[in-house]
Image (cartoon, coloured by chain):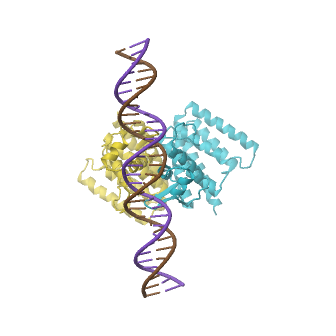
Chain colours: A cyan, B yellow, C brown, D purple
DNA sequence: TCATAAAAAATTGTCGACAATATTGATACC
DNA sequence: GGTATCAATATTGTCGACAATTTTTTATGA
C-alpha cells in the first residue's frame, strides 16, 4: 500500500529522481511556496530542478493523485484552489474515516499501540504545562495524535487514505489559512478522553468522541473564517 | 476533482492515449483478464497496444493511484493481490464513508436527487418482480444504488474517494471472487428503507441504516469465504 | 549436488526531440 | 473601440534511445 510515513524518509537509498521531485514539490505546495491555484509550467520546473520533463511529469501525476494538483489534457496542471467548501468537505471525510479508525483501534487494542499513545499523550501534557495556555499545541502535535491513532487501526486502506491522501491537504489548509493551534488545552482534554476510550476497548465511544472532536475542530475553523 | 463517472465516458473527444490505456487496463484488471498478483511487463504491454513505454507508464501510475497496482522502484508494477484482509478493510472504509454519504444526502435532500433515487428504486423493484427470488440484483444494480447516493452527498472529496478510488477495487473483488448477487430481495428492502430515511431528511437514521447494510453485506461475504 | 560468484540478459529510470494541441498576439473588419 | 479571424508562439503529448539497476543464466568451487 506504499505507505510513506508522514515525513518523507530520506533513508531509502534507491529513491528515484521522480520521487525526490515529488517530495520536494509536495512540500512547496503544502507550505504555499507554490501558491494555490497557480499554473504549473513543466518546462520551467524541469529547468529549475535540472530534470527532464519526463521525470517531472511523473512527480506531477503523483501530486495529482494526492489531490494537490489538477491536470487537464492538453492544458496542464494547476495547484488546487483552497475553498471553504473544500475545507468542509475534507473535515466531513475525516470525521467519518477517523471515527472508524478510532473504533478499530479500540477493538484491536494492541499493547504496543496503547503504550505509544500513552507516551505521546504525556509528552503533549508536559509541553502544554510549559507553554501553558499558549498555542503549545503545534499543528505537529495534533498531527502526531491523529496519525498514531490511524496507525493503530491496522486497516491499511484506511491508513493510506488518511495519511497519504488526506493529511497533506489538511496541512495545506492549515499552513495557508494559518490556523495554527486548534483550541489548545481543550483539544488536549479531548485527545485524552479518546485514548481512554480506546484503552477501555470501547469502540463505539471512541468513535463518537473522535467524531465530535473533529466536528468541533471544523466548527472552530468555520467561525474563524467569518 | 476529476470525477470520471462510473463507466468511462468516451464522449471526451480529446482524450489522451495514456488515458485510453488506463481505462482499458483498468477494465482488464478489474475483470481478472490480467490476473491479480501478476507482474506487469512494460515492454510487453507497450507492444501489445502499439504505444510507447512512456504513455503506458502514465497509465500504470494512474492505476497505482487507484490502488489496483503496486509499483516498486527499479522493480516494476504488480497487480494487487486479493486477500480476505483486504476485502474486510475495504468494507470497513466503505461503511464509514458511505454512512457519511447517506447522512449528507439526507441533509441536502435536493429535489432532483430524491427523484432520481426513487426512480432507480422502482426500476430495481420491477426487475426484482420479474426475476423473483433469483439474483436479479445484478452487481450493477447494487452499484447504481450506492453510486447515486454518494453523488447526492455533494461532497466532491467523498465522491472522488468512493467512486474513483474504492469502487473499482470492490468490483475487482466481486468479479474475481465471484460474489454476484448480494442477498437479493433483502438488499432491496434495505435500500428502500435507506432512501426513505433520506427522503425524511433523517441523516442520523440514514447513516445508521447504510452502515448496517454494508456491515451485513460484509458478513455475508465473510460467511461465503468459509 | 548445492552454494556462491561472475557474466549476460532483460527491465526500469531518465533523457532529449518531434508532433499535436492550446494560448497568445497581430490583423482585418464591423 | 470592440470583436472576430488568422498567424506565431509556447505548452503538452508521444516517442525512441541510452544509462542504471535488477533478474536470470552460467561458471566455479567445495
- Residue D18 higher or lower than A33, as above or below: above
| Along the viewing direction, whichever of A73 and B175 lies nearer the viewer | A73
Which of A131/B75 is in front?
Answer: B75
- Percent coordinates x, y for residue A99 in the rendering: 53, 46
The quadrant in which residue B182 appears is top left
What is the quadrant of residue A225 in the picture?
Answer: bottom right
Compared with A147, A176 (above or below) is: below
Percent x, y for residue B215?
A: 42, 43
In this orientation, which residue lies closer to the viewer: B10 or B163?
Answer: B10
Quarter of the view holding residue B144? bottom left
Which quadrant is the C terminus of chain A positioned in?
bottom right
Camera sees residue A42: yes
Against A80, residue B77 (above or below) is above
Outermost residue on the left side: it is B130
Residue at (57% x, 48% y) in the render: A24
Q: Is residue B182 visible?
A: no
* Residue at image location 57% in from the left, 46% down from the top: A210
Give coordinates of residue D8: x percent, y percent: 46, 70
Report the number of numbered marks.
0
Residue shown at 55% from the left, 32% from the top: A110
* Front-most of residues C22 and B137: C22
Q: Position of residue A184 (x, y in %)?
A: 69, 49
User: B3 left or right of A122?
Assistant: left
Amino acid at each position: 500500500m506504499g505507505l510513506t510515513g508522514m515525513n518523507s524518509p530520506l533513508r531509502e537509498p534507491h529513491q528515484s529522481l521522480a520521487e525526490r521531485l515529488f517530495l520536494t514539490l509536495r512540500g512547496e505546495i503544502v507550505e504555499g511556496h507554490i501558491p494555490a491555484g497557480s499554473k504549473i509550467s513543466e518546462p520551467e520546473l524541469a529547468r529549475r530542478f535540472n530534470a527532464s520533463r519526463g521525470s517531472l511529469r511523473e512527480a506531477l501525476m503523483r501530486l495529482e493523485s494526492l489531490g494537490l494538483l489538477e491536470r487537464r489534457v492538453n492544458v496542464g496542471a494547476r495547484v488546487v484552489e483552497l475553498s471553504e467548501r473544500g475545507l468542509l468537505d475534507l473535515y466531513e471525510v475525516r470525521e467519518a474515516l477517523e471515527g472508524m479508525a478510532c473504533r478499530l483501534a479500540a477493538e484491536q487494542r494492541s499493547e504496543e499501540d496503547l503504550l505509544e499513545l500513552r507516551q505521546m499523550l504525556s509528552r503533549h501534557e508536559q509541553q502544554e504545562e510549559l507553554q501553558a495556555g499558549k498555542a503549545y499545541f503545534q499543528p505537529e502535535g495534533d498531527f502526531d495524535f491523529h496519525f498514531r491513532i490511524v496507525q493503530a487501526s491496522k486497516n491499511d486502506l484506511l491508513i493510506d487514505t488518511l495519511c497519504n491522501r488526506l493529511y497533506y491537504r489538511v496541512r495545506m489548509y492549515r499552513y495557508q489559512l494559518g490556523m495554527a493551534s486548534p483550541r489548545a488545552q481543550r483539544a488536549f482534554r479531548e485527545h485524552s478522553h479518546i485514548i481512554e476510550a480506546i484503552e477501555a476497548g470501547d469502540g463505539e465511544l471512541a468513535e463518537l468522541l473522535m467524531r465530535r472532536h473533529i466536528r468541533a475542530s471544523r466548527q472552530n475553523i468555520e467561525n474563524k473564517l467569518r
